[in-house]
Structures are given as structure tokens and as C-alpha cells.
């Protein structure tokens, strides 16, 4: 059995095959997922797994260099947005590199998911609880 945090085989494969600048989306239960993008559906029931749990696990397992967030997330769900930013800042301190944070409209965000290698659907039911991570390198 794998010793590290991430034991989901689909997520492990995704992380292992990411190239520099590849994008992955972690989303709430309601975000539309493009048909041509790989869907990794973790949603079990409302809130399980949570957006924050999934983000933290993915940050523990992968190196990122950029974050894309819908502007609406900060306005409509400020506490959840602040928690996401805290996780990003913790990752920044851990890797010793600045991480870019880009805000776009929710409509632009939905269009941007078409470029993702995969969309990871959580059970989160908080409006706009979505993020796109851009893969970085560990060197």
C-alpha cells in the first residue's frame, strides 16, 4: 500500500503525469465539467469530501506555481476563500517559491476548465468553491 497522503489511484496517476504548466481544476459539486476533460469524481454526498480537504491533499502531493480563482469566490464565500488563500500561502512557505494568484470571472473560469488535464469534483456545496492549479517543478 502507498505510504504517502494520496491513496486515490486516479489522483496519484494524474499527479505523477503532470508536466510543467499543466492545469488541474478542483471544483465544487455544481461546476459544469467539459465532456472532453477527464473527470475525477470524488463527490460522495453534500460536503464529502470538502473542497479544503481536497485542496490540501493535492497541495501535499504536487508542486504548483500558479493558482486561478473566480473573482466571485472572494465576494460570495469570503471565509472559504480566505481558507484557500491560507493553504496557498502555507504551500508558498513550504516550497520557498512565490505562487502567482490570478482572479478571473466565473464565466472565464468555466471556459478555462476546458484546458485542464482533469477536473476533480468534490462534494463541496459552497458557491464558487473552485480553483485551477498550474503545475510547477520541484527544482
Image (cartoon, grey):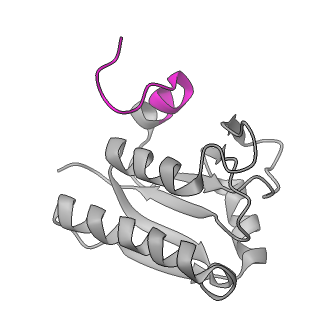
Q: Position of residue 56 (x, y in %)?
A: 41, 52
Near-viewer residue (71 or 85) = 85
Q: Position of residue 69 (x, y in %)?
A: 58, 73
Q: Position of residue 111 (x, y in %)?
A: 75, 66
Residue at (75%, 66%) from the top-left corner? 110
Is residue 53 depicted above or below 13 in this figure? below
Magenta residues, start to end? 1-14
- Left or right of residue 16, residue 124 in this image: right
Residue at (56%, 27%) from the top-left corner? 10
Image quarter of residue 87: bottom left
Q: Position of residue 102 (x, y in %)?
A: 50, 79
Q: Outermost residue, bottom direction?
A: 75
Residue at (46%, 71%) from the top-left corner? 83
Q: Is residue 4 magenta?
A: yes
Q: Is residue 91 magenta?
A: no
- Left or right of residue 130, residue 91 in this image: left
Residue at (62%, 51%) from the top-left corner? 116
**Count of numbered marks:** 0
- Left or right of residue 82, residue 70 in this image: right
Amino acid at each position: 500500500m502507498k505510504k504517502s497522503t494520496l491513496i486515490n489511484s486516479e489522483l496519484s496517476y494524474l499527479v505523477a503525469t503532470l508536466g510543467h504548466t499543466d492545469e488541474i481544476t478542483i471544483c465544487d459539486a455544481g461546476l459544469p465539467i467539459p465532456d472532453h476533460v477527464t473527470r475525477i469524481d470524488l463527490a460522495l454526498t453534500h460536503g464529502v469530501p470538502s473542497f479544503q480537504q481536497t485542496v490540501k491533499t493535492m497541495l501535499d502531493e504536487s508542486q504548483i506555481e500558479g493558482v486561478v480563482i473566480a473573482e466571485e469566490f472572494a465576494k460570495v464565500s469570503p471565509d472559504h476563500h480566505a481558507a484557500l488563500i491560507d493553504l496557498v500561502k502555507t504551500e508558498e512557505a513550504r516550497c520557498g517559491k512565490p505562487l502567482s494568484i490570478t482572479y478571473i470571472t466565473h464565466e472565464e473560469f468555466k471556459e478555462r476548465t476546458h484546458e485542464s488535464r482533469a477536473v476533480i469534483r468534490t462534494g463541496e456545496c459552497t458557491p464558487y468553491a473552485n480553483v485551477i492549479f498550474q503545475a510547477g517543478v520541484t527544482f
